[in-house]
Image: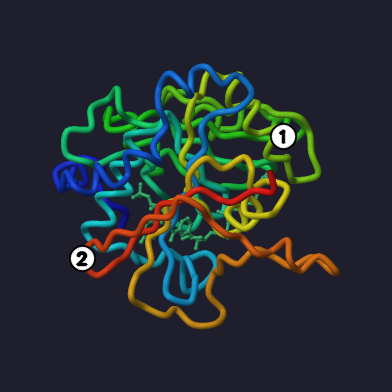
Amino acid sequence: MATDPAAAAAAALTLPSPTAAFLAPYLPAAAAAAARKDRPFVTLTYAASLDSHLSVAAGTQTALSGGGSKALTHYLRAQHAAILVGASTAAADDPGLNSRLDGADAGSQPRPIILDPRFRWRFSRDARVLRAARARLGKAPWIFVARGCLEDRADERVRWVEEAGGRVVPLDDCDGWWSWTYLLSAMRSLGVESVMIEGGATVINDLLRLENRALLDSVVVTVAPVYLGSGGVNVSPQHEQGREGEAVVRFKDVQWQVLGRDVVMAARPETCE
Ligand SMILES: NC(=O)c1ccc[n+]([C@@H]2O[C@H](COP(=O)([O-])OP(=O)(O)OC[C@H]3O[C@@H](n4cnc5c(N)ncnc54)[C@H](O)[C@@H]3O)[C@@H](O)[C@H]2O)c1
Ligand SMILES: Nc1nc(=O)c(N)c(NC[C@H](O)[C@H](O)[C@H](O)COP(=O)(O)O)[nH]1
């Protein structure tokens, strides 16, 4: 059964100050993010197994982070204006997409953004992200949908999102896919100054491709001491034929911190400048 947001808030997380100091150089600075008008500050973040898997199988959620790295993730959420996931993550995880960090108030909650061009996530009024918003434990979601897939404005899902204070945002029609330049520019024009992108694998692998890497300001990856085995949902940017080198992603400004059983990397991607 899905966790009740009120019960989740009661199980609030705390972050030790050395971890906050470790993350500080990788966080969006308010003035710089506000000054940048073409796109928000972007942090890509996820938790993976030793074999770089996000979950044991598509459509399922696998808990990887221990208490310390989970607190780090919720701290990161509170440091960003928005948190974004793909439609398959929304469908598989029924996520709350709020910060349950101890002391996170309404003002520090990120705006959940769900990429769902074909509006195929069949959520109910009881979806955790909606319950969290109604309980004032998080902001209400914005769901990005292609205009042509949003003909039925009487769709009860639109009503539920609006009732919670959120929006189903019509974006340009597309073939099921928007470029990240377009998406980030759309977010910035909606006033979003920083966004934490949590996944899933389709989103992450796409953002790590050579043409998108320069859009990433920070990358924060938790590695948990477990193998999930082949068949899992894998983070591994794809080789394109004849362009093998382009799938190799290297990082600069790399720092690691051990948090309980997990290790966390904070870094910036190297781009071909
Ligand atoms: N461990 C972690 O940190 C973590 C984080 C997130 C998700 N997950 C897991 O990942 C799995 C889901 O990952 P996935 O790869 O199946 O799906 P996903 O969450 O990446 O969603 C993919 C869908 O999002 C939409 N989308 C993504 N990019 C888009 C773009 N540029 N333009 C338009 N639409 C776009 C499309 O509908 C696409 O089919 C689940 O098992 C979930 O539990 C784990
Ligand atoms: N940091 C992290 N560790 C994990 O072990 C794990 N499975 C995720 N997964 C990220 C994904 O985005 C999930 O959907 C949200 O972690 C669920 O979000 P909530 O806590 O419900 O808000 N993230």
Q: Position of residue 206 (x, y in %)?
A: 66, 53
- What quarter of the picture does the C terminus occupy? top right
Which residue does the image show at 39% across and 58% down from the upper left? Answer: 265
Seen from the viewer's position, the closer of residues 243 and 253 is 253
Per the image, the residue denoted by label 1 is 146
| In the image, residue 165 above or below residue 17 | above
Q: Which mark is residue 260?
A: 2
Are the residues tagged 1 and 2 within 8 Å (C-beta)? no
Which residue does the image show at 52% across and 40% down from the upper left? Answer: 217
Q: Position of residue 150 (x, y in %)?
A: 69, 31
Q: Position of residue 39 (x, y in %)?
A: 60, 27
Q: Amino acid at mark 2?
A: Gly
Q: Which mark is residue 241?
A: none
Quarter of the image for residue 10 reads top left
Left or right of residue 114, residue 163 in this image: left
Left or right of residue 201, residue 260 in this image: left
Left or right of residue 144, residue 139 in this image: left
- What quarter of the picture does the N terminus occupy? bottom left
